């Protein structure tokens, strides 16, 4: 009987599949495993990156107050250094309140290690229904990949200089990003 339900959910999901594409980030659909399964019977497409509002907040030992960086010329004005390892911290599903812990983690990390610490802020996109937040995490993952690809190219860094740390849905985003970056030093 459960096989019949699984087949039904798969067929319904396939029949109503949708897809959305965002420039260099790629395309995202609502097919299994993202929707139409027994575990996720409802489907949702990720929001547009502008609606998600992802920000990359750089902390260094020299600059304990963050500098927002983007994959453009603004990074040249930052204290980012190719000689240091780079850690990305991605938080997970938030209802309210606890959104500053990645920034605090960066500050704590800098007391014992000289790194580029980048807190990935996407709080607009995780304060929603869990199914929607899970799909938004896919775009955040692609944005992290895009930023790492930019940094590797701009600063001629190897993938083994990068470490992605994620919690909850942020861990899903970290894992997805890591699967797209061969030679990544570490995913936690």
Image: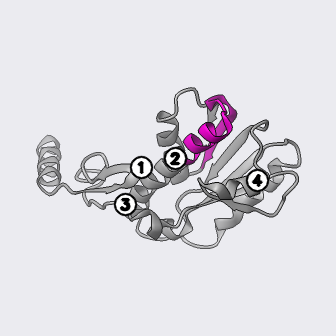
| Disc 2 residue crowd, few under 14, some 14–19, many 20+, Cα 10 Å | some
Q: In terms of depth relative to the viewer, which is nearer, 155 or 184?
A: 155
Instruction: Label 1: state its secondary structure.
Output: helix
Residue that carries the numbered disc 3 in the rendered image: 46
Residue at mark 4: 106
Q: Give residue 21's position: percent from left, percent from top.
A: 32, 55
Task: Name the element at disc 2.
Answer: helix
The tally of labels here is 4
- In primary-sequence order, the first of circles 2 and 3 is 3
Highlighted magenta segment, given as a residue range:
146-166
Q: Position of residue 83 (x, y in %)?
A: 79, 36
Q: Give the answer, above or below, for where 14 lies relative to 83.
A: below
Residue 108: x and y in percent read 82, 52
Asked whether 13 or 81 is in front, the reply is 81
Q: Are marks 1 and 2 in contact (CB under 8 Å)?
A: yes
Q: CA distance from mark 2 to mark 4?
A: 21 Å
Determine which residue is flagged by label 2. Answer: 146
Q: Position of residue 145 (x, y in %)?
A: 52, 44
Q: Is residue 124 above or below residue 140?
A: below
Marks 2/3: CA–CA distance: 17 Å
The residue drawn where x is 30% and y is 46% is: 33
């Amino acid at each position: 009987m459960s096989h019949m339900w699984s087949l039904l959910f798969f067929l319904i999901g396939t029949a109503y599949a949708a897809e959305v594409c965002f420039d260099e980030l790629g395309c995202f659909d609502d097919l299994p495993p993202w929707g139409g399964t027994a575990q996720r019977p409802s489907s949702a497409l990720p929001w547009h990156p502008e609606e998600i509002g992802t920000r990359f907040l750089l902390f260094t030992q020299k600059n304990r107050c963050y500098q927002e960086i983007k994959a453009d010329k603004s990074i040249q004005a930052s204290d980012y250094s190719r000689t240091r390892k780079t850690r990305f911290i991605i938080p997970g599903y938030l209802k309210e309140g606890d959104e500053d812990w990645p920034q605090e983690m960066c500050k704590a990390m800098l007391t014992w290690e000289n790194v580029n610490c980048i807190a990935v802020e996407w709080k607009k996109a995780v304060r929603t229904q869990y199914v929607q937040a899970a799909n938004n995490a896919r775009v955040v993952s692609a944005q992290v990949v895009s930023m790492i690809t930019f940094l590797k190219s701009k600063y001629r860094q190897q993938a083994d200089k990068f470490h992605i740390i994620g919690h909850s849905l942020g861990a899903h985003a970290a894992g997805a990003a890591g699967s797209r970056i061969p030679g990544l030093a570490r995913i936690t």
